[in-house]
Amino acid sequence: MILFFDLNISEKTEQFIFNRDESKHLVKVLRKKIDETITVTNGRGLEWKGVLIEVNVQKSIANCTAVIIHKPQKNKIHLAIAPTKNNNRMEWLIEKVTELGISSITPLLCDHSERRVIKKERFEKIAIAAMKQSLQFFIPQINDLTNFNAFIKVTKNSSFIAHCKNKSKELLSKSDLDSNNVTLLIGPEGDFSLREIELAINNKIKPISLGNQRFRTETAGLLACHTVFVKQLQKSNL
Amino acid sequence: MILFFDLNISEKTEQFIFNRDESKHLVKVLRKKIDETITVTNGRGLEWKGVLIEVNVQKSIANCTAVIIHKPQKNKIHLAIAPTKNNNRMEWLIEKVTELGISSITPLLCDHSERRVIKKERFEKIAIAAMKQSLQFFIPQINDLTNFNAFIKVTKNSSFIAHCKNKSKELLSKSDLDSNNVTLLIGPEGDFSLREIELAINNKIKPISLGNQRFRTETAGLLACHTVFVKQLQKSNL
């Protein structure tokens, strides 16, 4: 199956018109013909099936044949992470956590952040490509760059902050998740500051470790999400 | 701490001479001075500490002050994986599994492999860089590209093969690992062939799933290793 994406398609859409770029892709690369079936999602759970009634490089059209509305996962992971200095590493992370199916990403501005600007549109593009490639119907919500102090005030249970300081902390793989909604905070290359860690703890965010290794920021981000994912799988009936 | 690497350094080395490239790096980038301490590893557990007695861009010298011999981890993970078509993705994987601290990597040649040649030296360079960056003293052993059929015959317990076919399989996160030595087999972009999966099962390799997602090859490789890592942490007294 090949998945197309359109932000505005809905369960009420009866006819879908491919734009010029996608029409060209449909004809030249995918070699689609009239009467073939195509699938489009809006990244918010919709699986829209249609049959091609017109196929050419300028404009292709499909008529709706079926609509499936996927429910969002019960288990939600929210990753709040300081964007890496090297932007490629952050983009790689966006791809991987989208494959994993996490719900939202907040780029964090921290005391030790070296990167203080992000290109949100670029992150969204990468998330859409990864969603299509991994045949999912949800894209993670990508929030604006948020100041650590502001983020801390609005985050709810169960939230965890990973840091490398030699202070009391629990292994995430052994922690109680308490809830289906988990928020994970991952710091920049220079780690969270002591001030930030204390502020987080005062706001009931649990300090955690991912093991004895010293992970790069983007590795820690992915592996923290995956640890929660594995724990959720272990509890599931899958 | 900054970690240097030299394949030939041993616990018996009394004096270490930096080559021209590293001497330049030492002086121009790290701005090291005489009497400062440096650390060198051979990637096989050695942490060699020395004090600089000569520092210049042509040649720098350190005299040994201490030697620490790290023991290899009790838990060993061996990843056997079909190299991805896009070489960057495979190189990324080598970096990440080195950060995680796995023991060995075997590039697999499978029925559906699109990439049939690898640059082992390049993989080794990436593993060394990742080891230095994550301050570890072991590099994973990188084996030659090995035919699936040949690999299957020599692999021992406990081995797991991940595939996407709709056949009976267990979740890796819920599987018994049986042993501290775990081998994980991950297929190419087009998955393992049915023939390969059957051959593996006949050789007592357990078929497993990583969840309902459809992961890219390199994502599956990292997340399979990390699942075993999380399970080993959960059993540990850390």
Image (spheres, coloured by chain):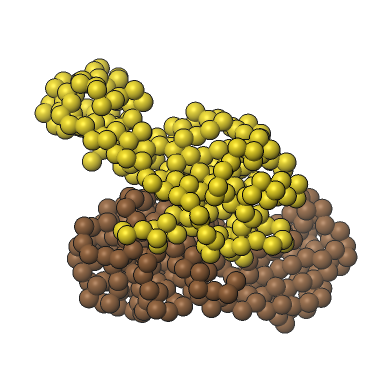
Chain colours: A brown, B yellow
- Given residues B189 and B100, the one toward you in this image is B100
Does the image show residue B13?
Answer: yes
Q: Position of residue A222 (x, y in %)?
A: 45, 58
Q: Position of residue B85 (x, y in %)?
A: 63, 41
Q: Tell which residue pokes out farthest to the left in this image.
A: B35
Residue drawn 32% across and 53% down? A212
Instruction: Say above or below: A7 vs B163.
Output: below
Q: For the N terminus of chain B, which image quadrant? A: top left
Q: For the C terminus of chain B, which image quadrant? A: bottom left
Does the image show residue B89?
Answer: no
Residue drawn 70% across and 80% down? A11
- Given residues A107 and A171, the one toward you in this image is A171
Residue drawn 25% across and 27% down? B11
Instruction: Report the label total.
Output: 0
Q: Position of residue B120 (x, y in %)?
A: 53, 30
A29 relative position to B101: left or right? right
- Given residues A193 and A54, the one toward you in this image is A193
- Given residues A114 and B221, the one toward you in this image is B221
B153 relative position to A171: left or right? right
Q: Tell which residue pokes out farthest to the bottom in this image.
A: A12
Q: Position of residue A192 (x, y in %)?
A: 26, 60
> In the figure, residue A217 lies in which quadrant?
bottom left
Q: Tell which residue pokes out farthest to the right in this image.
A: A35
Residue drawn 66% across and 35% down? B150
Q: Tell which residue pokes out farthest to the top in this image.
A: B58
